[in-house]
Amino acid sequence: MSDTRIAFIGAGNMAASLIGGLRAQGLDAKQIRASDPGAETRSRVQAEHGIEVFEDNAQAIADADVIVLAVKPQVMKAVCQDLQASLRDGQLIVSIAAGITCASLQDWLGARPVVRCMPNTPALLRQGVSGLYATAEVSSAQRQQAEQLLSAVGTALWLDQEQQLDAVTAVSGSGPAYFFLLIEAMTAAGEKLGLPRETASQLTLQTALGAARMAVASDVDAAELRRRVTSPAGTTEAAIKSFQGNAFEAIVEQALQAAATRSAELAEQLGK
Ligand SMILES: NC(=O)C1=CN([C@@H]2O[C@H](COP(=O)(O)OP(=O)(O)OC[C@H]3O[C@@H](n4cnc5c(N)ncnc54)[C@H](O)[C@@H]3O)[C@@H](O)[C@H]2O)C=CC1
Ligand SMILES: O=C(O)[C@@H]1CCC=N1
């Protein structure tokens, strides 16, 4: 990455996280450019990261080795069709949009090297995780560039099949929202049990953080960690029995299936 030039099309939340991660890794501000129609968005990334910003996407990609498509899936087709004429051979396209296939991107941009990724919002704290899939046109040097880009904001994992990105979207792309939902529910339940809201919130948040850190650091799996909390005939067992009596695992499986199905549907709808 020492002399790679990267252009971001769309400078919203995910792009700003990636730019922040790259800058923290020591990439020079001169190596990064971004374009966005929002004047406020442009000013913000320029002020925060010292990079050059553009209103015009074609200007932003002029000297780029890597072009990161960080717009919403719904505008991707129009953005690509506008960019197509300004692309040079050898530029790597990296898309972080949910549910936009490599085939659609290559349909709109030509048969170029494309890496499709699914990051998640903890990228904001460089605690993200991403799945990456590369088309056959991507060289090994470009694979490394894409991996380094996503590694700047967390863990980057390669996939063998593009379809697996629907599952990655269901597990980790949307995943932070599931944990936030559990945090909301546990905080509300703690309050109902008689705790002040702020206390219930702090207890829940620190428990979530502690449990996640333990699970990451542990050499045993989550099921074993759970067993270690669960005393025979104790309080945890009562709660776990209640969760499982209400088909907790099935609820989780159905929710992730819904997310994966939606990811595939988006590809179908927006790929045309
Ligand atoms: N938010 C999330 O949890 C995740 C989002 N993603 C994907 O990341 C992409 C970006 O999402 P966010 O950063 O959350 O959205 P965002 O709305 O914060 O950023 C998108 C940016 O694109 C800009 N934009 C709109 N039209 C444009 C155009 N014609 N040319 C250039 N820029 C344009 C918008 O002004 C906005 O600043 C989406 O495709 C989403 O699917 C991927 C993983 C997780
Ligand atoms: O909800 C969505 O569609 C996007 C993709 C993953 C997270 N947010």
Image: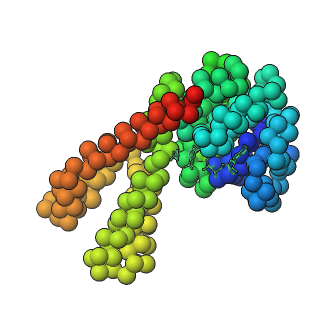
Q: How is the image coloured?
A: rainbow
Whether residue 151 is visible: no
Q: Left or right: where does residue 130 sit relative to residue 15?
A: left
Q: Between residues 193 and 157, which one lies in front from this camera angle?
A: 193
Q: Residue at x 64, y 28 (%)?
A: 105
Residue 125: percent from left, percent from top:
60, 56
Whether residue 266 is visible: yes
Look at the image and tell me in which quarter the N terminus lies: top right
Q: Residue at x 77, y 32 (%)?
A: 83
Residue 32: percent from left, percent from top:
80, 44
Q: Residue at x 55, y 39 (%)?
A: 98
Residue 163: percent from left, percent from top:
48, 27
Residue 51: percent from left, percent from top:
82, 51
Q: Quadrant of residue 151?
A: top right
**Where 58 falls versus 239 (above or below)?**
above
Look at the image and tell me in which quarter the C terminus lies: top right
Q: Residue at x 35, y 64 (%)?
A: 185
Q: Left or right: where does residue 264 sit relative to residue 90?
A: left
Q: Left or right: where does residue 137 sit relative to residue 175?
A: right
Q: Quadrant of residue 214?
A: bottom left
